[in-house]
Amino acid sequence: MAVATTHSASEEFRVRARSWLQAHAPQDWRERLASATDRQVADFYIEWALQLHGAGLLVPHWPQEFGGGGYGIQEQLVVQQEMRKVGAPRPRTLQISLNHAAATLMRHGTPTQKNLVGGILEGDVWCQGFSEPDAGSDLASLRTLAARHGETYVVNGQKIWSSFAAHAQWCLLLARTDPTAPKHAGISFFLMRMDSPGVTVRPIRQSTGHREFCEIFLDDVVIPVEFRLGAEGDGWRLARTTLVSERVLPMLDEAEDLRAAVRTVAMQIAEADHLRGHARDGLVDRLTEVAIGTDVLAASSEKAVAEYVETGALGATAPILKLYHSELVQRLTGIAAEVGGVYALIDPGDEVRDLGYLSGDWFTDHMRSWTFTIAAGTSEIQRNLIAERVLGLPR
Ligand SMILES: Cc1cc2nc3c(=O)[nH]c(=O)nc-3n(C[C@H](O)[C@H](O)[C@H](O)COP(=O)(O)OP(=O)(O)OC[C@H]3O[C@@H](n4cnc5c(N)ncnc54)[C@H](O)[C@@H]3O)c2cc1C
């Protein structure tokens, strides 16, 4: 997404964001959602996003023509910082809508397709139908077929791991339009309505109990040509916008979440009567390493923000930050689960709500931390990228 730099982050914006959030951020949302259904949790996040938008705090960094504030990325980061201070929820269900879908539509959409961005600000949930059972890291080997019939495509195949698909109105879909072309060249990018006949969504229950992602089955699904994004066969190039934007903004801000969690775990170690001698010292040593790592991440993120504001790209920094952050989350949640001792092992059962990845239910958080080393490109793939693109090593 091009970064708008019409205004610089101002103290006045921060003050306005802070006072609105202090007055309006829900305080007891974790308790309220504890007994809610998945649908109610999704509705809660969407409703909260709409309130933020009404106050000009959902997408201050979007261009004004798309309903944003016309500010820069700094203002978005200011909102995230102020939200953290008051313990406000992040509108998780709209994560793909607000990041990948918006960036892709704004940059590559036709005027009709660009209009769909407006729907996001009214609560449209988008999911991403890229991965397939046999196409994850090697995404270009995907096999879902889109066959052209006049002014429509008929799509058949299966997608998997699609986050938020159970609540989605729209899907960013990659499908093969030319099975005879080299694998990267035969892929096209579609915008698919999730209520189209032939779309079946089946949520997958994760080991944590969450049902964040889903399988999507596509049986003779008809997509009008006007909902193909870009030219036929250009899907792979366009998908890169989606993939690059996938974690840029959230990632730049995550060091602060980790810092807050390190402080919480430090308090818990101090208060844990069952920890003695070497056990306590060992945990303190390991937490200290994570705390230092978090400072390194924060400093590197700050540098990356400056680079992003200047160039609109993260370049070589992205895989390094992603790898470093995801491994810190794993180490921190692992330490926190150990501090909890046997109590951390109590199975919260089926009623696990999506309350974020540092929810304080440390054992669940620790299991969930593995999603960071897989989603949006596994750690091994990040290491390959660092080796080849940053260090210049041979493939
Ligand atoms: C929480 C979560 C949310 C997700 N959300 C979405 C979504 O919304 N939409 C979507 O389309 N997908 C989504 N995904 C899927 C995600 O993009 C894939 O899981 C990921 O790309 C890895 O693909 P895979 O699972 O098929 O594993 P594979 O690619 O089969 O990899 C298996 C193992 O082999 C390793 N490996 C593979 N290739 C190489 C290589 N070249 N060099 C070294 N090691 C290699 C991997 O690192 C991994 O350890 C999500 C995944 C998670 C965990």
Image (spheres, rainbow, N blue to C red):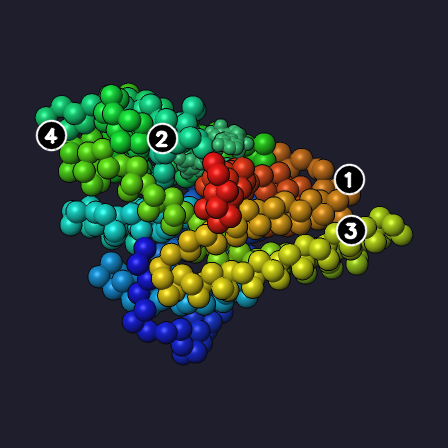
Kindly identify which residue carries mark 3.
283
Q: Residue type at mark 3: give it.
A: Leu
Q: Residues within 10 Å of mark 1 (few under 14, many from 20)?
A: few
Instruction: Name above or below for residue 100 compared with residue 263.
Output: above
In the foreground, 224 or 55: 224
Q: How many numbered discs sit on the rendered protein?
A: 4
* Residue 355 image point, x, y percent: 54, 48
Mark 1 or 2, closer to the camera: 2
Left or right of 282? Residue 150 is left
Are dots 1 and 3 in contact, CB under 8 Å?
no
Q: Residue type at mark 4: give it.
A: Glu
Q: Is mark 3 within 8 Å of ligand 1?
A: no
In terms of secondary structure, where does tag 1 sit? helix
Q: Is mark 2 within 8 Å of ligand 1?
A: no
Q: Is residue 385 visible?
A: no
Q: Residue type at mark 2: give it.
A: Ala
* Residue 262 image point, x, y percent: 67, 57
Q: Residue at x 27, y 62 (%)?
A: 63
Kindly identify which residue carries mark 2.
140
Q: Earlier in the sequence, mark 1 or mark 4?
A: 4
Q: Earlier in the sequence, mark 4 or mark 3?
A: 4
Label annotation for residue 151: 4
